[in-house]
Amino acid sequence: MQLNLVQAINQAMYQEMERDKSVMVMGEDVGKDGGVFRVTQGLLEKFGEARVVDTPLAEAGIMGTAIGLAVNGMRPVLEIQFDGFTYITLNQLISHAARMRMRSRGKYTVPLVMRAPWGGGVRALEHHSESMEAIYAHIPGVKTVIPSSPKEAKGLLISAIRDPDPVVFFEPKRLYRAFKEEVPEEPYTIPLGEARILQEGKDITMITWGSLTRTCMEYVQNAKYGIEIIDIRSLSPFDENTVLASVKKTGRAIIVSESPKSGGFAAEISARIAEKALMSLNAPILRVSGYDVPIPLAKLEDYYLPDTARIGKAVEEIMKY
Amino acid sequence: MSRKKVFEAQIEYLQILDEKGNVDASLDPKLDELTLKKMYETMVRSRAMDKKAISLQRQGRCYTYVPTEGQEAAQVGSVMASKKEDWMVPAFRENAAYLAKGVSMRTLFLYWMGHEEGSRFEKDQNCFPVSIPVGSQVGHAVGLAWAAKIQGKRQAAITFFGDGASSEGDFHESANFAGVFQIPCVFICQNNQYAISTPRARQTRSETIAQKAIAYGFEGIQVDGNDVLAMYVATKKALEKGYAGKGPTLIEAITYRIAAHTTSDDPKRYRDEAEVEAWRKKDPIARFQTYLKKNGFWNEAYEKEVQEKAAREVEEAVKKAEGFQANPEDMFKYLYQDLTPDLRQQMQEMKQSLEG
Ligand SMILES: Cc1ncc(C[n+]2csc(CCOP(=O)(O)OP(=O)(O)O)c2C)c(N)n1
């Protein structure tokens, strides 16, 4: 069936809730309203108030109680309304969800998923366009996933829900209704921790995730060089092998990300390449990213977000070597 | 051994002007004509701005907008009870409060049109920028007022938040501070019955939001939030108490969000039109107009003048805001006092990439 990102994510939750009674959905406005992006639409009607919960407006409360729910046999899928409000969950996520298994020596586990719309490009209000995924990928004990298409999202979310550990699932809101693609009707999984090669090429490895996979694909349509595009899908666990194998082939790496540059996840990828494939490189590793500023309000957003022109500059630069 | 009652509390409700515009003479603050008219005009200006912003958003000339309609009295009554030096710390629905504080409509439009410049206030305008993370501003207000107390200034803070925000830890922690340190802060919870789709009853089992103050050791009161006089009187009293070193007050303004949550919201999904209609009959502006008329301060000619003036102000503000050109370098320049080496370099890179 042809589905957009919203519909594919909705279908993944629907099917998992049908399959497993312990799966529940909780968050602000996820029930009657179907979520502000309608991602949870129809779930309340089908699965009822006990499993689809409109919570009070309290993110620390949502995450804190979800930990208890998860330890005692439920599989909560939390929706935090926007990326910029996930920070309120961090104390619970870092201090408890992430380390409950470790502290209890495996007795208690926290199989929850925190979903949140993520990233810029939709002219949203302040705090609604954030891409601070590096913070989440930095938490030992938490997995961080960012899908890049409807088909990808369905398989990755089903894996996340079935995963025995906490997973942060960031949904590129710019892609929510951007396009449809064929999504298999039956449930399927895509393993967490496997990158995918979106496009093969011999000259440059271009590594990215989320909405920028589209920008990179758009760029290569008219590119002079052979560009291999890798959608890393899952920041943690990270698929080092796919990245290293590609860089060893091309000898050049550009990492494209919409986060502020310094300390972003692009830096982690760059370090891996430097550590393990330095001798294969023909050129310095380059990053095309947001600047080290909070993503600006709508009017200046485009000056901040990487686009094909900035990607093109990096490509020309790296091909000088 | 014994079993006895150790604590008891009650919450008062204040209304001065009823839904039909009848006044309780014993409670009427009997404000002067100038003040009353300024109240009225500020509410009308806010309503006019709302209408325009929603229509601009539909035309793609303004981004997501958060309407104030229905809550004008709660904001204007309380801000007008404060002094110029007092702080006004809003959430995101406080267009009328900003106008009452003297912020220009141009500035407000700039914000909703996606410009950082929309958070630039004049030197003598003690207000904070819009705070979108729900409840996060409440602590700032407590801190502002705390500083005033430490420095011995006769200054207080008013902070606005919604019924939804009363569920956030930020609200509870900040209220507790205000109680513990007896801070001159007035907490104004605009209980507009909804947090997006979530009804008030789903936020808390408490009978009132006002009673949350009791838990933190200070006074809470419910006020008819569509009654501008009651809001004025309750806030004035709370501020005087604050200046006198007697601590904070929580005012629960009972009101209603007449418009959609934002221009991205469709309220038909979660509430009945009949409910909205019932609240329209309690409109704060119409009610106050009746009061002004009874006092001989209102007639058709005045109304025409007020409406026309508001419409002109809106048009001029939109023109100015639309004529504003943002400078992309500003995203770097205001982050720290001085540009860091990284930012300097990134700004240069941006300029080069714009030059192509
Ligand atoms: C921390 C946080 N969580 C979620 C949101 C998304 N959101 C914006 S407004 C809102 C409802 C706020 O309700 P209330 O506090 O009652 O204020 P109202 O909108 O009714 O004025 C929500 C959930 C947010 N802005 N901040």
Image: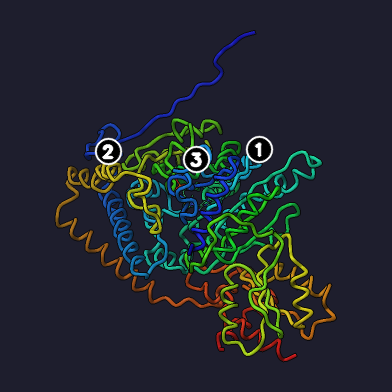
Numbered disc 1: secondary structure = loop
Task: Please name the residue that numbered disc 2 is placed on.
Answer: B17
> Dividing the image into 4 quarters, which one contains the N terminus of chain B?
top right
Whether discs 2 and 1 lie on one chain: the answer is: no
Q: Residues within 10 Å of mark 2 (few under 14, many from 20)?
A: many
Residue A60: % across, % down: 61, 45
Residue found 38% across the figure and 59% down from its top: B263
Height in image: A2 above or below B5? below
Disc 2: residue Cβ within 8 A of ligand 1's nearest atom: no
Left or right placement of residue B304 versus residue A132 in this view: left
Numbered disc 2: secondary structure = loop
Residue found 39% across the figure and 66% down from its top: B109
> Dividing the image into 4 quarters, which one contains the C terminus of chain B?
bottom right
Disc 3: residue Cβ within 8 A of ligand 1's nearest atom: no
Q: Which residue occupies the foreground of this view, B158 or A61?
A: A61
Q: Which mark is residue B242?
A: 3
Determine the CA span between mark 3 and mark 1. Answer: 49 Å
Q: Which residue occupies the foreground of this view, A104 or B354?
A: A104
Task: Please name the residue that numbered disc 1 is placed on.
Answer: A73
Read off the chain for label 2: B
